[in-house]
Each structure stands twice: as structure tokens, then as C-alpha cells.
Image (cartoon, rainbow, N blue to C red):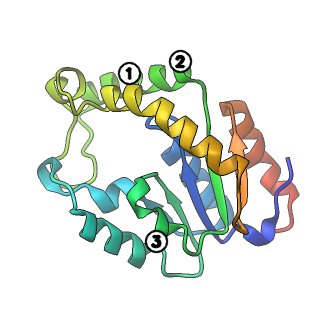
Amino acid sequence: MKCDTSKLNRINVIGTSGSGKSTFSKELASKLKLPYIEMDSLYWKDDWKFASDEELINNVRLATNDEQWLLDGNYSRTQPVKWRNVQTIIWLDYPFHLVFFRVLKRSITRLFDRKTLWGTNNQESFQKSFLSKDSIIVWMWTSYPNMKNRYSKLFEKNTKDWQLIRLTSPSDAKEFLKNLGNFKL
């Protein structure tokens, strides 16, 4: 896989919920010594309240105003801001069955570990994970085909000076991270 290391200063990692964006991004940011920004932390407030579009866009603008950053997340309404100065977009484009399994496993795990997410008291609950129309499982199931279609078009018709990297399996992602050591950064 070719990688232009001169374009590894401003990166956006994208993919559906459950594709492993945060895990991959944290490791990549650490290897590249880039500030790591999680989109969900810019969006979610306490008590599962969320930032307005104006707040979110402003948060993204401030977070991506520096010369170096690695942002993980989608939120298509923020694309004009986050992709204004992006150099590389990495798409974790994994098969539906794998991503669905990961979202399901993560939701069950979070029910038991009660980990606080993005705010002071945001925790997954059985109701929120399995019985709500806003469930992350429902979101992943319904958004996967649209996101796959949208990002496929982006990668087919890149008209920008962006480096686009499409990783189609966890082993691709591991290989990419491993090979970073072979590049002169």
C-alpha cells in the first residue's frame, strides 16, 4: 500500500459505527505523535444531550485549526469544515457482518462495565442500546449502506489533493499501522 508520509499531519479516520475508528485512530495518532480528536467528544454533552449543528461545527473548526491533528469520526454535516485542511482520509471499510458483530458486542460490554462516555454521566443502558429507535445498533444497521455508498463515491472520484486510504479488514489496518515504521516520518 502506498502512503505519502508528507500528508500525515492532518488526518480524518472515517467508517461506520463499530468499525474501530477510535481504537485505530488512537494507535495511529500515538505512532505519528499527532493530537487525537474524537468527534463524539465534540458532539456529546452530559445526559446524552448533543451539541447543536452550530456548536458542533464550531467545535470541529477549533479542533482542526492547528497544523497537526488526527480526527476520528464522520458527522457529514461537518465535512466542509473538517476537510477544509485535511491531507489524508482513512476509511475503515469493513464488511457489514463484522461491524454489526462489533457494535453488538460493544453494546453488551458497555451494559456491564458501565463505562462513562463523552461527558460526566453518559452510560449505555439496555433501553438505549436495544429498545430505542436511537440505538447505536439500529443506527449502524440503517446507516451502513448509505455510508458505504457515499464513501465509495468519494474514493472513486477524488477531485481534491487528498490522500485516500481504504482499509477493508482489520488485518489491513494492522498491516498499515505496522508498516508506518517502514516509512520515514
Secondary structure beneath dot 1 equals helix
Residue 104 is marked as 1
> Pointers 3 and 2 in contact (CB under 8 A)?
no
Residue underneath mark 2 = 97
Residue underneath mark 3 = 81
Kindly identify the residue that appears in the image at 34 percent across and 32 percent down. Answer: 139
Nearer-the-camera pick, 140 or 80:
80
> Pointers 2 and 1 in contact (CB under 8 A)?
no
Kindly identify the residue that appears in the image at 19 percent across and 45 percent down. Answer: 122
Q: Work out whether mark 2 precedes mark 1 in sequence or the reverse, and give the earlier one.
A: 2
Kindly identify the residue that appears in the image at 86 percent across and 67 percent down. Answer: 184
Q: Work out whether mark 1 precedes mark 3 in sequence or the reverse, and give the earlier one.
A: 3
- The residues tagged by marks 3 and 2 sit, at their Cα atoms, a distance apart of 32 Å
Q: Work out whether mark 3 precedes mark 2 in sequence or the reverse, and give the earlier one.
A: 3
Q: Amino acid at mark 1?
A: Leu
Q: Residues within 10 Å of mark 2 (few under 14, many from 20)?
A: few
Secondary structure beneath dot 2 equals helix
